[in-house]
Image: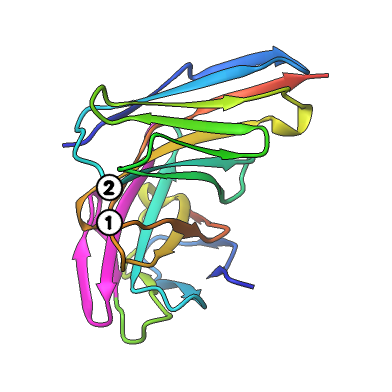
Amino acid sequence: KQEVTQIPAALSVPEGENLVLNCSFTDSAIYNLQWFRQDPGKGLTSLLLIQSSQREQTSGRLNASLDKSSGRSTLYIAASQPGDSATYLCAVGGSNYKLTFGKGTLLTVNP
Amino acid sequence: EAQVTQNPRYLITVTGKKLTVTCSQNMNHEYMSWYRQDPGLGLRQIYYSMNVEVTDKGDVPEGYKVSRKEKRNFPLILESPSPNQTSLYFCASSFTKGGGYGYTFGSGTRLTVV
């Protein structure tokens, strides 16, 4: 059974800092990995999708990497802003198109 | 605009009163799924559907029913809601062709059962 772990559970940084969020998964037989952002009480916004054959994806200040063999992904956020404050969720896509989620990292960016 | 629409956004109901949460997508996606999100437990899959008339259980299906009579709609039915079904519910859809797929999520339905 796939298990997804996100470290740290919470992170507080000053504005402008570069930061890395970590995601690990136990079964390397994945179809893809997707990073989401969730604001309090709100829905999930897709940030980046990495297919199993890819190593990384970039969108603006965000960069996500994938190392299937070691079961790891990182989400790099450059020059963080207060508007980046949210919970970031890592989800691994497996057979039957099922997504298995980590429990998230709560990010606070202080002005 | 491509989207997944859930209704209602908020619902308070009493134990045992049947309810339906609707989900509709306008992207012609084959795959649709329901998740619930609970503090400390994260998001867990309830049911999913690979296409019309094809549904299957996820990790936490007890107390829920679904149907997929049309490609765009995937309602979640609680025949006899109980307080432990108080949760934040999300519907999601995805295309399946080509091997790679990305999910689009609805805005969520916050259900309280008293």
Range shown magenta: B40-66
Residue at point 38% right, 31% down? A66
Residue A31's mark?
Answer: 2
Above-or-below relation of B41 to B19: above
The picture places residue A1, in percent across and down from the top left corner, at 16, 37
Q: Which residue is mark 1?
A: A97
For the question of whether residue A49 can be seen, the reply is yes
Q: Verify CB contact (< 8 Å) between mark 1 and mark 2.
A: yes
| Position in image of residue B78 (x %, y %) | 35, 67
A81, B20: nearer the viewer = A81
Determine whether, in the image, residue B56 is placed left or right of residue A110.
left
Along the line of sight, the residue nearer the viewer: B54 or A40: B54
Q: Alpha carbon of mark 1 to alpha carbon of mark 2: how far? A: 8 Å
Residue type indicated by callout 2: Tyr
Name the front one of labels 1 and 2: 2
Q: Earlier in the sequence, mark 1 or mark 2?
A: 2
Q: Quadrant of residue B81?
A: bottom left
Q: Chain of mark 1?
A: A
Residue A89 falls within the magenta-colored stretch: no
Q: Is residue B40 above or below residue B107?
A: above
Which residue shows up at 25% across the image and 70% down it?
A: B50
- Give residue A105's position: percent from left, percent from top: 51, 25
